[in-house]
């Protein structure tokens, strides 16, 4: 579904992505992990067309993304730090996005109700706490029933209750056969979610394996332990 | 108009600064016309006020607004919307709101007091100057990520066009007074939209006699149909060129 070929991104001298090639298919739930500053968010932003790659190509369903913007219809994106116009309220943001998209598709407002955003619709975005902003981001990402979900640190900043709701929702969407891409540092959280792991370091993809492969090759039961095992052996 | 443009216009019109800008223009215009008994003198005074305030407000308000829209732009970018559409909507939104302020504030009194042909010319010039400086604002705000720097560039550009340029021209004409530089002067004027606008109006007011020999050359050039069309074409280029440069940069920008 998403094909990434020899993708590189340089910010002047800094090489953030280095010849990254990946392929992600429908029905997969992929965890994108790696230390801070390894290029995870840049990779995601490249897929979304927010960052323009220096070299390489990205294809969505065999169409180069630089030629089109339509593919973003099928992607729900939850940013790590959602930035919204300060003086708009939650309700206005939701209404605006709905009006701009103007789809006749069935909207998925499960999260909207589960996060109880209805009671705080009038609140301005600048007055919201980090966690509430994340709830708005999550609601927007799932709202249009996208085929692909890209979640950048989805549970960071959410309270345990909300992050449980979000996790349940991710599992439910996974069962529908969607492609889900998650970055996270909380490896323990990923155990019951993901089917594949992409490990990045210094702008390179170190490995891209299924969870089962990883577990059998390291002999560990948990993802966190398996990763730790690999990191230890590498050094 | 597209939906994004509508959101931007509504957002700007809610902004009190635009309201105050309209009010100031209205007070100035009505004041000038009711103080001067001669509408030509009134127009001359108003011309100077308009050519100073309209570019200043247009360029600074737009620059700050574009910087403050960074979140809005980021939010829209993850939606299925073409990049150029976001930038164009922002441009049209800002232009339309500032034009509305100008037309309500200064346009109504001008149409009431000034004769139609010269009043119409004044309105046209005001419209062009507003849009030109909105386009310049787009250029200065895409030039750097730093908001303070971007606003600084906008202010410097305004100072250059509104104040400095005339000084340079004056200096040049004194230095080269012995040479036949009149024709060059016409060309040099094209590099300043404010001067271009001023000359267009002055020639129509028939006060170009005050401009001496250079004035005669200007009248010869700008006075006829071709000259006016050329002047407006150059003003149009002043809108298109800065905006298109900014658009090309925006399409390659990392957000």
Image (cartoon, rainbow, N blue to C red):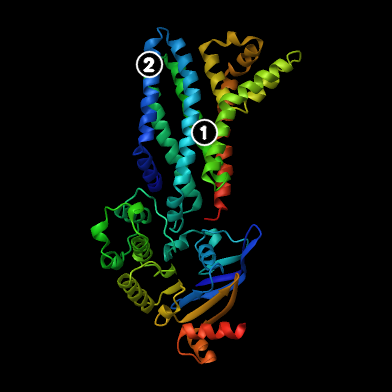
Residue B150 in the image, given as x and y percentages of width and height: 54, 41
Number of numbered tags placed on the structure image: 2
Q: Nearer the viewer, residue B111 or B14?
A: B14
- Label 2 marks a residue whose chain is B
Question: Which residue in the structure is indicated by mark 1?
Answer: B133
Q: Residue at x 63, y 21 (%)?
A: B167
The alpha-carbon separation of the residues under discs 1 and 2 comes to 25 Å
Q: Residue at x 36, y 65 (%)?
A: A138
Residue B183 in the image, given as x and y percentages of width and height: 69, 19
Left or right of residue A59: residue B174? right
Instruction: Give the mark nearest the N terminus, 1 or 2.
Output: 2
Question: Which quadrant holds residue B104?
Answer: top left
Left or right of residue A102: residue B207? right
- Label 1 marks a residue whose chain is B
In front: label 1 or label 2 = 2
Left or right of residue A223: residue B218? right
Residue A7 in the image, given as x and y percentages of width and height: 61, 67
Give the vertical position of B104 relative to A125 (above or below).
above
Q: Residue at x 58, y 48 (%)?
A: B249
Local SS, label 2: helix
**Quadrant, the N terminus of chain B:** top left
Determine if residue A99 is in view: no
Check disc 1: other Cα within 10 Å, few if <14, some if 14-19, many if 20+. Answer: many
Give the vertical position of A14 relative to B48 (above or below).
below
Question: Which residue in the structure is indicated by mark 2?
Answer: B31
């Amino acid at each position: 579904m998403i094909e990434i070929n020899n993708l590189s991104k340089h910010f002047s001298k800094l090489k953030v992505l280095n010849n990254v090639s990946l392929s992600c298919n429908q029905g997969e739930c992929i965890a994108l992990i790696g230390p801070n500053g390894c290029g995870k968010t840049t990779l995601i932003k490249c897929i979304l067309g927010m960052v323009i790659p220096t070299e390489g190509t990205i294809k969505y369903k065999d169409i180069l993304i630089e030629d089109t913007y339509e593919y973003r219809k099928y992607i729900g994106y939850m940013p790590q730090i959602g930035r919204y116009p300060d003086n708009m309220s939650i309700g206005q943001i939701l209404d605006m996005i709905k009006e701009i998209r103007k789809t006749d598709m069935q909207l998925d407002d499960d999260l909207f109700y589960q996060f109880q955003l209805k009671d705080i619709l009038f609140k301005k975005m600048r007055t919201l706490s980090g966690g509430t902003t994340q709830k708005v981001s999550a609601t927007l990402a799932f709202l249009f029933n996208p085929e692909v979900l890209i979640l950048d640190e989805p549970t960071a900043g959410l309270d345990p209750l909300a992050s449980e709701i979000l996790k349940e929702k991710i599992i439910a969407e996974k069962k529908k056969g969607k492609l889900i891409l998650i970055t996270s540092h909380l490896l323990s959280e990923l155990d019951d979610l993901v089917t594949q792991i992409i490990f990045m370091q210094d702008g390179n993809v170190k490995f891209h394996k299924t969870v089962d492969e990883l577990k059998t090759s390291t002999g560990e039961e948990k993802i966190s332990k398996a990763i730790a095992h690999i990191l230890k052996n590498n050094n | 108009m597209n939906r994004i443009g509508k959101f931007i216009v509504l957002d700007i019109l809610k902004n009190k600064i635009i309201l105050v800008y309209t009010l100031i223009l209205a007070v100035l215009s009505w004041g000038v016309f009711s103080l001067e008994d001669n509408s030509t003198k009134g127009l001359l005074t108003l011309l100077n006020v308009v050519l100073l305030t309209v570019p200043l407000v247009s360029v600074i308000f737009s620059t700050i607004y574009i910087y403050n829209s960074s979140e809005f732009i980021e939010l829209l970018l993850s939606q299925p919307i073409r990049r150029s559409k976001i930038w164009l909507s922002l441009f049209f939104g800002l232009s339309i709101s500032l034009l509305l302020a100008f037309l309500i504030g200064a346009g109504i009194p001008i149409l009431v007091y000034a004769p139609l042909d010269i009043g119409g010319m004044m309105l046209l010039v005001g419209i062009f100057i507003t849009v030109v400086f909105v386009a310049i604002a787009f250029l200065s705000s895409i030039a750097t990520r730093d908001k303070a720097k971007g606003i600084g560039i906008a202010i410097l550009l305004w100072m250059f066009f509104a104040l400095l340029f005339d000084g340079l021209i004056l200096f040049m004409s004194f230095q080269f007074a012995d040479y036949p530089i009149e024709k060059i002067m016409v060309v040099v004027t094209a590099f300043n939209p404010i001067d271009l606008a001023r000359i267009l109006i002055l020639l129509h007011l028939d006060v170009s006699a005050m401009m001496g020999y250079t004035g005669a050359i200007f009248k010869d050039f700008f006075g006829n149909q071709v000259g006016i069309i050329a002047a407006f074409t150059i003003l149009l280029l002043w809108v298109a060129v800065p905006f298109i440069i900014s658009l090309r940069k925006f399409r390659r920008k990392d957000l």
